[in-house]
Image: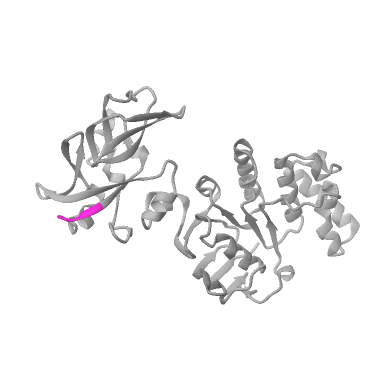
Amino acid sequence: MASLNIENVEKSFDQTHILKGINMDIRDGEFIILVGPSGCGKSTLMNCIAGLEDVTSGSISIANQDITSVLPKNRDIAMVFQSYALYPNMNVRKNISFGLEIRKLPKDVIANEVDRVAKLLQIEHLLDRKPGQLSGGQRQRVAMGRALARQPKIYLFDEPLSNLDAKLRVEMRTEIKKLHQRLGTTIVYVTHDQIEAMTLADRIAVMKDGHIQQFGSPQEVYDNPANRFVAGFMGSPSMNFIEVLVVQKQDRACIELAIDGITHYLPTPDQEQRVRQMVGQTVILGIRPEQITHVIPHYDDNPGIARVDATVEVIEPTGADTLVLVRMNGQEVNCRVDPYEARQPGQVMTLMLNMGKAVFFDVDSGERI
């Protein structure tokens, strides 16, 4: 196990600037996820940590040892790729042991290590099979086993579950979480799937255009996004963004919201001081679908709760709850309600907005107000 420190790392390919001053301090034993859209630089950063790409400037340290110029084979890092990269002519046992044999470890040590890893991943019954006889999930376990057999300081996972079907992804996600809890080894994991990021990570680094937009715990990133990009990227369905006018009513800063021709003035209890400075200006209201619900009577005592009536346009049942689409200020807004409380399209439904959970963004920059 080891800490990982990345300081002012930049990476360019000719005139194309990919990483633009990345700084991260990863603690010993942490599970860190790099998440972001395609082309944001997350896999390039992973390759720089592994030594597969040279950094243009900056430094990378493992356990306080600078490894920026160290060859990949000497970094004591194991990597699991999106493609399983197994040797098709070797059985599972040989695939797992091959790297240990290259390092010329004693045969009894290799045998014990293969048995340990196979038991850990519950693939003991697969050791004599070849990759062509395995399912996708089994192949991914073997690829992980090959990395685990190394017992490195740091594990790197580059979108390891993206080739699996939805159900298997969920199962493997759980297995990886259990694995980390058992091993306690530092892991850096790349994905574009924000659900994977939320469920697996100790901390998430949300990336865009070669920059880290926010680096924090899953709940912190979800509840207190640094900007509109982070707010929109994390969460499914995405956060609602509504252009609203900030007004002053009865000496309080409120937002003006038109629904079905009726103007409502909604409170901003937790953001009163900051929003007050924007009176007379248009801002972006960000509110997640689960903060717009059916009427829950015991919530009425909360000063941040506002009730509004809205015409339902579309409903999307998901089983546990139903997504209801309405319009506010002429914009489509998703609400998450109890399936038995949802109204049909064309019907009017009373909704509760929890403005205590709302966030506000600058219209032009997208930065958090």
Splitting the image into 4 quarters, where does residue 327 fall? top left
Splitting the image into 4 quarters, where does residue 316 fall? top left
Q: Which residues are magenta?
A: 279-283
Residue 89: image location, x then y, percent: 86, 50
Residue 113 left/right relative to 68:
right
Residue 234: image location, x then y, percent: 44, 49
Compared to 325, does 186 lie above or below?
below
Residue 8 visible from this viewpoint: no
Q: Residue at x 40, y 44 (%)?
A: 238
* Magenta stretch contains residue 280: yes
Q: Residue at x 24, y 33 (%)?
A: 300
Q: Residue at x 86, y 57 (%)?
A: 109
What's the colour scheme? one colour
Residue 135 left/right relative to 362:
right
Residue 165: image location, x then y, percent: 63, 39
Residue 295: image location, x then y, percent: 28, 29
Tell me the quarter of the image containing the C terminus: bottom left
Please, what is the dominant secondary structure of the magenta stretch?
loop
* Magenta stretch contains residue 178: no
Compared to 155, does 123 lie above or below?
above
Compared to 64, does 139 lie above or below?
above
